[in-house]
Image (cartoon, coloured by chain):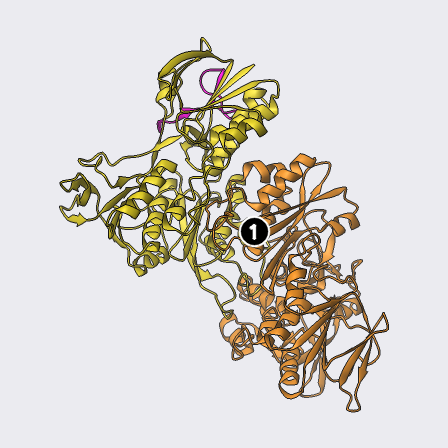
Chain colours: A orange, B yellow
Amino acid sequence: MRIAIIGGLAAGPAAAAEAKRRAPDAEVVLFEEGPNISVGTCEMPYLIGGVIDPSVDLVVVSPAEMERTRGVEVRIRHRVTALDPARGRLTVEALDFGSTREEAFDRFVLATGARARRLGVDGEEAAGVFTVRDLVDTEQIRRWLDTEDVRHVVVAGGGYIGLEMAEAMRERGLRATILDPKGRVLGGAVACEASDLMDRAVRGAGVLVRPERATEVLTDDRGRVRAVRTDRGEIVGCQMLIVSVGVEPRAELAEAAGLRLGDMGGVTVDDEMRTSHRHVWACGDLVQIPRAPDGRRVLWPLATTARRTARVAARNVAKPGSDRFRPFAGAVAVRAFGVEVGSVGLSMQRAKGAGLDAFATDIRHVSRTKAFPGASPIDVRLVVERRTGRILGGQVVGAEGAALRANVLVPLVIRGSTVRELAEDLDLVYNPPVAPAVDPLKVAASRALRSL
Amino acid sequence: MRIAIIGGLAAGPAAAAEAKRRAPDAEVVLFEEGPNISVGTCEMPYLIGGVIDPSVDLVVVSPAEMERTRGVEVRIRHRVTALDPARGRLTVEALDFGSTREEAFDRFVLATGARARRLGVDGEEAAGVFTVRDLVDTEQIRRWLDTEDVRHVVVAGGGYIGLEMAEAMRERGLRATILDPKGRVLGGAVACEASDLMDRAVRGAGVLVRPERATEVLTDDRGRVRAVRTDRGEIVGCQMLIVSVGVEPRAELAEAAGLRLGDMGGVTVDDEMRTSHRHVWACGDLVQIPRAPDGRRVLWPLATTARRTARVAARNVAKPGSDRFRPFAGAVAVRAFGVEVGSVGLSMQRAKGAGLDAFATDIRHVSRTKAFPGASPIDVRLVVERRTGRILGGQVVGAEGAALRANVLVPLVIRGSTVRELAEDLDLVYNPPVAPAVDPLKVAASRALRSL
């Protein structure tokens, strides 16, 4: 049996290794058009900011290691240009040789991932405009910062990557401005709807958040970014622009192969990660997967869920029916400017968007016993289904203990547990140096329970 | 309706307030033999060590506040010497007046709590020998430290309170030695069976842990402790001895009233916290309550579960059948000498004691992405039922993020979730500054899953 894995950033290598483990007799070939496989992306802002030692290698597994230790054949700099599942054929372009040929496989796993969204405005191709998606971006950004006279950086998008990049710029001693139409940070995957702690911290670090959208990139006579024009007609001078306005699935290959796509443009898969063609599975940022609170299949381009989809796809490509994906909670955390945000499940905005009858309960409590040195405010929002008391999601924000507190909500959201269970049955730890007598999560749940 | 609540340390006041809230027309009377009600005990070591500001008042609610804001009649310095449930009578001694009389009530809630165990050795009544249980102890310890020439303190018992007290002594610049027959710390409620991180930290802080038991307290000519003799025949000189060898239920009143006691000496209650007499409920450290992994009813003298039992008792005393106690996970945390331990559910030792066919999986991972500054080792032990893969318990140890990580195990232990669910379905947060790509809990669960 020959298995082709297409895409080598994160899900692809995980799927390839697991497929080979589960089907040791199969020939597993991993195709990647770039020069690296298995790259850690979440560290990039910290590498750029100099927080992580610049000598750290974000390549988790090299192609040679992958071949030697996992028994997977790796072809970097090979672009798959077409997939014909009916005939069991891939068209592969060897980028370093300029040659293209067809190859026969029995089963396929698509892991082409996602690409950074662009602003789609004039001047966006200027030198000094970057997205943060892969090692090439990271290297280019570092080189730009090291060689150009950068004093002020504009970050388009106040999501978690935008926030991390703004912090990275401050770490390097540069001025930074975030442009976000909401005039606030963290309105997306990491939801922070009710707390002002992060916004205060951002402002306190001297980062301006402007309620604007970039409409044009202005350049100097050498084609370098020199300013951004916004939808309010303002001109914001800068020597670098980071575009972090989300990602979109790289579904062109799947679409051309006739595979069904979902309402968000991702590839449609069943719980075994099988696409609409029985010999093709897909995984990673490319696919729409079911979220726990309402079962809706959505794009959720995150490493934690990507790894899981990769494993499920690989196990089933090795032996159909051997594993299935169970709805995910959607836990994300960010730490920037001394404040953590942990966010799980549906935000209030998404719950409403999903047509759920939900309400939100917001409380402020403390990270440790109030009298204990280091105790700091913690804000909790719980999003609760009115009829059932089910916890649909939650957000925890504070200087310490916020991200890990959010983790407690993961099994609750997945199991459909109620605020009553959190408020009354869960004996979460209490000890003055680590948590107050009643944990902030339980305080929020008790409050929500009274509102039911 | 007249309701008597007997015992005012923690569970009693909580039960009194909740009973009055649920039965506003009832007359609720709270009896406490000491001078205070509603006292926070967990802060005491930090107050003694000077970590918490000495002006902090550990009385959460004063008697006057309790009366004014909760509508509960409070009688401090009143000792209940007998309970006759059949006749609906209490015998109460007013300590400040030397008078004793009978009072009639319709329903009773026993919340007499627990007392510190003693060593039961000669010389234990010497001046300078203390337990750490209430405000009086705390005051006496502080006075002793402030007025005597204390240089070396022996702590009998390496449980979490012993550990916190040893740290408090170091905070005050004193030498400290822990005597524990196991020669290790944390072998009880807070289990730390497989990690050496805490033991190293204790040693690193200059605290000696001796594998010995105190067999005699030696005194000077003024009756003050001057040394402890151990079961190895050693003499350990000291100017203060802290006895922290656990607590035992104060069940004498219940026993004399003819109420049924459990195998551990606690009062037997059903899920409504009702004792063997239909007009008497009990709560707090006094009762045996069902733990989640095996349903066994045990003593679990902890504030978090005491509060819950108090609420259940109070709701049912106000309206029988209105609430029930659900098995608890048993989550406890301690932080001392820069190391945290979070412990949930059954230790391996307790699982074996319960006759469960369990195995333990031990892993060492990191608190954050390894390359991120501040990342430190985290040890996880999972205790797993062999036949089902159910998580029976877990221990998390590390310099940061250990106590709160343990909380994730609370809903899993309560719901009987398996290591498969933790390893594969829970998308715990990942972000370099707060957690590594695969959370230590998930790493341990994956390892355990492979052992199944």
What's the residue at 52%, 27% (across, down)? B15
Tell me if mark 1 has few (under 14), some (14-19) or many (20+) residues whose alpha carbon lies within 10 angstroms of its own. Answer: many
Q: Is residue A249 left or right of residue B390?
A: right
- Is any atom of residue B123 visible in this view? yes
Which residue is at the front of the view, A7 or B106? B106
Q: Position of residue A29 (x, y in %)?
A: 61, 73
Q: Is residue B280 magenta?
A: yes
Relative to A272, does residue A294 appear above or below in the rendering? Answer: above
User: What residue is disc 1 on?
Assistant: A405
Determine the image quadrant of residue A338.
Answer: bottom right
Relative height, residue A40 to residue B89 (above, below): below
Give the tally of numbered discs. 1
One can see residue B324 in this view? no
Which residue, as the protein is rendered here, is positioned at the far bottom? A222
List x then y, in percent, for residue B19.
56, 24
Foreground of the two, B450 or A120: A120
Residue A337, given in percent of the width and then of the height, sits at 60, 65
Q: Whole-percent x and y of residue B29?
A: 50, 21
Q: Is residue A92 left or right of residue A422?
A: right
The N terminus of chain B, quarter of image: top right
User: Which residue is situated farthest in the top direction here?
Assistant: B87
Chain letter for the residue marked with disc 1 in the picture: A
Query: In the displayed structure, would residue B310 be above or below residue A433?
Result: above
Amino acid type assigned to the residue bearing label 1 in the image: Arg
- Which quadrant holds residue B8? top left
Question: The residue tagged with tag 1: helix, strand or loop?
Answer: helix
Q: Main secondary structure of the magenta part?
A: loop
Q: Residue at x 53, y 48 (%)?
A: B408
Question: What's the magenta region?
Answer: B263-281
Examine the structure image and report whether residue B75 is included in the region drawn in magenta.
no
Q: Nearer the viewer, residue A117 or A217?
A: A217
Query: In which quadrant of the rendered view does residue B301 lie?
Result: top left
